[in-house]
């Protein structure tokens, strides 16, 4: 059983399909911002693995290599960012649920192998979520 609060939270996120971008004053990101750098480092991998198209975020990842200030969250990237976040949350949600269900297995040898693989998936998705936020 999936936790109902997280299910409703995820549904609200996925409900948003478009949004008018409102710029934030002083939202320029410095090239040495560690949190943004974690996310930007993951973009090449995410662009290959995710179903969400993130071409504008890929462009931002290239711009940051020039060590100039940039606006990671802008009118071109805001919905890509949102859709990517929804996709990662959806997979993370499913992975946690799958991990929980593995614990119900009775065949110990298979259970241990599945738990390791599922734990690695949960860890990878959790790291992606940490980087994106």
Image (tube, helix red, strand yellow):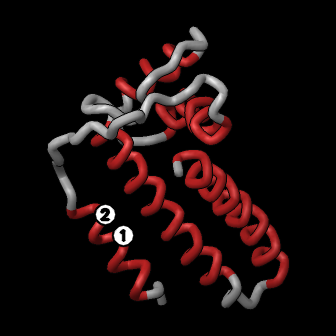
In-image side of 49 versus 51 (left or right): right
Where does the image place residue 84, in percent across and percent down from the top left? 40, 46
Where does the image place residue 11, in percent across and percent down from the top left? 29, 71
Quadrant of residue 68 in the image? Answer: top right
Quadrant of residue 107 in the image? Answer: bottom right
Quadrant of residue 115 in the image? Answer: bottom right
**Is residue 64 shown above or below 8?**
above
Callout 2 secondary element: helix
**Is residue 15 shown above or below 51?**
below
The residue pinned by badge 1 equals: 10
**Is residue 35 shown above or below 89?**
above
| Image point (78%, 65%), residue name | 116
**Is residue 106 shown above or below 22?**
below
| Cα–Cα span, label 2 and label 1 | 5 Å
Where does the image place residue 95, in percent across and percent down from the top left? 56, 67
Classify 10 Å Cα crowding around label 1: few (below 14), some (14-19), many (20 and above). some
The residue pinned by badge 2 equals: 13
| Image point (36%, 74%), residue name | 9
Residue that lies at the very extreme toward the top in this rendered image: 66
| Image point (35%, 25%), residue name | 56
Where does the image place residue 133, in percent across and percent down from the top left? 53, 51
Classify 10 Å Cα crowding around label 2: few (below 14), some (14-19), many (20 and above). some
Callout 1 secondary element: helix
> Tags 2 and 1 in contact by the CB under 8 Å rule?
yes
Tell me the number on the disc at residue 110: none
In-image side of 16 versus 4 (left or right): left
In-image side of 10 versus 48 (left or right): left
Which one is in front, 133 or 23?
23
In-image side of 96 versus 73 (left or right): right
């Amino acid at each position: 059983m999936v936790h109902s609060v997280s299910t409703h939270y995820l549904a609200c996120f996925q409900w948003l399909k478009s949004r008018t971008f409102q710029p934030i004053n002083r939202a320029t990101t410095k090239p040495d911002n560690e949190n943004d750098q974690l996310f930007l480092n993951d973009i090449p991998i995410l662009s290959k693995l995710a179903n969400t198209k993130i071409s504008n975020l890929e462009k931002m990842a290239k711009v940051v290599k020039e060590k100039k200030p940039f606006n990671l969250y802008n009118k071109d990237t805001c919905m890509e960012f949102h859709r990517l976040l929804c996709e990662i949350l959806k997979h993370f949600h499913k992975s946690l649920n799958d991990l929980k269900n593995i614990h119900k297995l009775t065949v110990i040898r298979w259970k241990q192998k599945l738990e390791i693989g599922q734990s690695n998936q949960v860890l990878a998705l959790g790291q992606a979520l940490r980087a994106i936020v």
